Image (cartoon, helix red, strand yellow):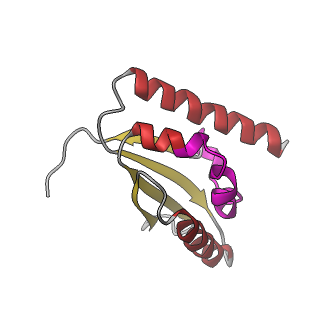
Amino acid sequence: MQEAARRTVQQGVQQDVQQGVRQGGDRGAVRVVLWCRATGADVEAVESAYHRVSATLAGTPGLLGNELLRSAVEPDVFAVMSEWEDMAAFTAWERGPDHRDATAPLRGYQEPHRGRSFDLFQKVAGYS
């Protein structure tokens, strides 16, 4: 059953990426938000898994950085937000051979109750 769910999520990512590229989404920064949930002692496990994944991804071409965010309203809800140079960089990594192994430590915490455990956002405008 978990294998079927994994394939469904993977197909969803591929469809979203393809849709983003078709809409001209290959031109600007892309942020990927992975939704996670943990309870009790698992809160520390999510943080530990995030650090392991981040260490593995250090130096990945096109990855500008990532953050672990914790909900101020629901303390067992986390978001891992990664920023990529563009959709092409994210797509190359997501389809590459290292993607599955690199992200494995967080997989057990993915939040399936949102309809899907991730979102893709393309930067449209910003101020600093």
Give the residue displayed 67% in from the left and 73% down from the top: 42
Asked if residue 45 is among those painted magenta in the image, a careful observer would answer no
**In the figure, residue 71 lies in which quadrant?**
bottom left
Give the residue displayed 68% in from the left and 51% down from the top: 100
- Percent from the top left, x then y, of residue 13? 57, 36
Query: For the C terminus, which image quadrant?
Result: bottom left
Please report the bounds of the magenta region as a residue range: 93-116
Give the residue displayed 60% in from the left and 38% down from the top: 115
Query: For the N terminus, which image quadrant?
Result: top right
Q: Is residue 48 above or below residue 64?
A: below
Asked if residue 107 is among those painted magenta in the image, a careful observer would answer yes
Magenta segment's dominant SS is: helix
Q: Does the image show residue 95?
A: yes
The residue at the far top in this view is 22
> Between 72 and 48, which is closer to the camera in this rendering?
48
**In the figure, residue 52 lies in which quadrant?**
bottom right
- Percent from the top left, x then y, of residue 107? 68, 56
> Between 93 and 50, which is closer to the camera in this rendering?
93
- Percent from the top left, x then y, of residue 60? 49, 57
Give the residue displayed 24% in from the left and 38% down from the top: 124
Q: Does the image show residue 70?
A: no
Count up the numbered dots: 0
Q: Is residue 112 above or below residue 66?
A: above
Q: Is residue 78 above or below residue 41?
A: above
> Between 35 and 21, which is closer to the camera in this rendering?
21
Residue 69 horizontal side relative to residue 37, left or right = left
- Percent from the top left, x then y, of residue 108? 71, 59
Residue 114 horizontal side relative to residue 80, left or right = right
Residue 86 horizontal side relative to residue 118, left or right = left
The residue at the far right in this view is 1
